[in-house]
Image (cartoon, coloured by chain):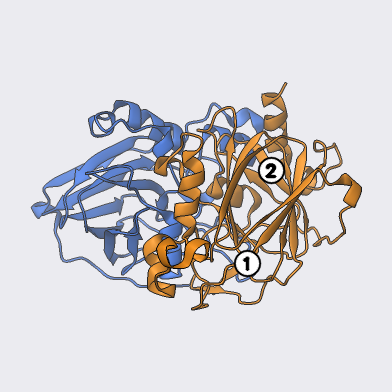
Amino acid sequence: MMQNLVESQLTPENAVLDQVCNSGDPWMAEIKKGQIFRILDLEGNQAVDTLFYSAANPEERYSAVDTIARQAKLYLTTGSVLYSSEGNAMLTIIADTCGRHDTLGGACAAESNTVRYALDKRPMHSCRDTFMHALNTCECATHRNMSKRDITANINFFMNVPVTADGVLSFADGISGAGKYVEMRAEMDVVVLISNCPQLNNPCNAYNPTPVRLLVWN
Amino acid sequence: MSIETQQKALNLEQILWEETIPGGNHWSGLIRRGTSLRFTDLTGGANLSALFYNTEDKLERYNMPDTLKGQHTAFLTTGNVCYSDMGRVMCSIIGDSLGWHDTICGVTDAAQIEAKYGKANFQTHRNDMYRSGKDGLLIELAKYGLSKRDLVANVNFFSKVTPDESGNLSFVTGHSKAGSYVDVRFDMNVLLVLSTTPHPLDPATTYKPGAVKISAWHAGLATADDACRNACGQNSRAFINTERYYL
C-alpha cells in the first residue's frame, strides 16, 4: 500500500472560500492558478467524485488515462500530478492525510446501477445524474456550453479501489476517516465539478453518504 | 470470473471481408450488431487502440470505469464485455489467444511520440511518418462530426500493463506474438474507431508499430447460453438493457 502522508500548514481561518457540500449534491467553482484547494472528509469514508476543466477552454479536461500513463501509477497521493487531455499539469497534490485516491472507478450512474446491482435500482440518486444537473444549472458550466460530452473518467477522492498484480479490481472499505483531507495546488485556472457521492450500494461511502468541506486559499 | 483463453481458426468461408491496418495508422467504420471482428497482430508487439460509439446516438460511448467496476477487473479478456455509459453492452470478447488487453493507459499524443522516438514527418518520410494515437483517433472522429470532447478512455488491444502492490505500472514486453488475436462481437450498432500506434508505456525507443488484420464474420446475437452474457450477473443485466434498446 502506497502511503505518502503529508500534512498541510494552512488553516481554515485564512481560507478565501470555505463551504460544505452535502452528500448527493453537486459543487462547482473556479480555482485560479496558484490557489490551493482542499477537500476535507468531514465524517469519514465519503467518496468525492471530481472532474476538472481548464477554465479557459473546457475542451481541455482532466484525463484519467493521461494521469495514469504519464506517471505509470494507478493511485493518486501527495506528489501526483493531475494531467489534462492535452498533457498539461492541471493540479498537483501537495498534502494528503488519507494516502490513496482512486481514478479508475468512475462515477455511479442511474444506468450503471441497473447493471451493477439490479435493474430496479435505476431511480436511485447517482453521481452522473448530479454531474448532469450541475452542468445544466451551475453558472460556471452553462456559460461554457458544457454537457454530457464533457463527462469523462473522474477522480474518486478518498475512495479505495485496489487492483492486484493479476488484474482483479475490487471496492474495499474506505481508508479515509473523519477529518482526513487532500490538498492540491492549481497549475492553471480550473473549473472544479464535484458530485459528493450518494452511492448506497457499496462500501465506498461505508453505506452512509456524508457531507464534505471545500476550502480554497490564495 | 474466469473463462479460459480460446484459440481457434476462422472458417475461411465465413469471412465477409478482410483488411489490414498498417502499423502507425488509423481506421474507422460502422459495425452492425451481430457482426464479429477478429483482430490479428501480424508481426507481434502490435497495439490496437479502440473506441466505441453508438451509431444512432454518438453521445453514448465506451465507458472504461463502468466496464472495469462492473466486471471487477482492471483488464479485458474472453468473457468480458465493453459497457457503454448507458448501461448497455457495446461489444463482447468472444475469443482471445492472449488473456490480457489494457484499457487504463490511453494513447500517446504528438509531443510524446516526438520526445520518445524523434521526429519523422510526411515531408521527409512520406507515409512512414511517425503518427500519434491521439491524432489518429481525432482524425477518424472528425469524419463523423466528433471531436476532442468525444475522446474518452480507450481499449488497447494486445498490450499488457500490470500493477505492483503500490500501483506502479509495468508494461509487459513481448506479450503479443505474431498471430495473436482477439475476437470482438458487436452487440450494438457501433462506430468503431481504431489506431495502430505504440502503447504509451511501451519502453521501445524505435518507432516500429505493428500491423493489425481485421477479419469480419456474422457471429449473430448473444444467445441465452452465451459465455459473455453469463460471465456474471452484471453482464446479464447489461445484455437485458441492450436488448430492450433494440425492441
Residue at the image position 88 percent from the left and 45 percent from the top: B14
Q: Which residue is mark 1?
A: B210
Residue at the image position 74 percent from the left and 39 percent from the top: B236
Residue B54: x and y, percent?
Answer: 59, 34
Front residue of B115/A206: it is B115
Q: Quadrant of the C terminus of chain B?
A: top right
Chain identity for the colour orange used in the image: B
Q: Which residue is mark 2?
A: B91
Element at label 2: strand
| Residue B123 vertical position relative to residue B229 in the rendered view, above or below | below
Residue at the image position 17 percent from the left and 54 percent from the top: A33
Amino acid at pointer 1: Gly
* Chain of residue at mark 1: B
Amino acid at pointer 2: Cys
- In the rendered picture, chain A carries what hue? blue
Residue A149: x and y, percent?
Answer: 42, 36
Element at label 1: loop
Q: Quadrant of residue B178?
A: bottom right
| Residue B92 vertical position relative to residue A139 in the rendered view, above or below | below
Q: Quadrant of residue B191?
A: top right
Query: Mark 1, mark 2: which one is toward the viewer?
Result: 1
Q: Do marks 1 and 2 share a subunit?
A: yes
Q: Quadrant of residue B28?
A: top right
* Chain of residue at mark 2: B
Q: Earlier in the sequence, mark 1 or mark 2?
A: 2
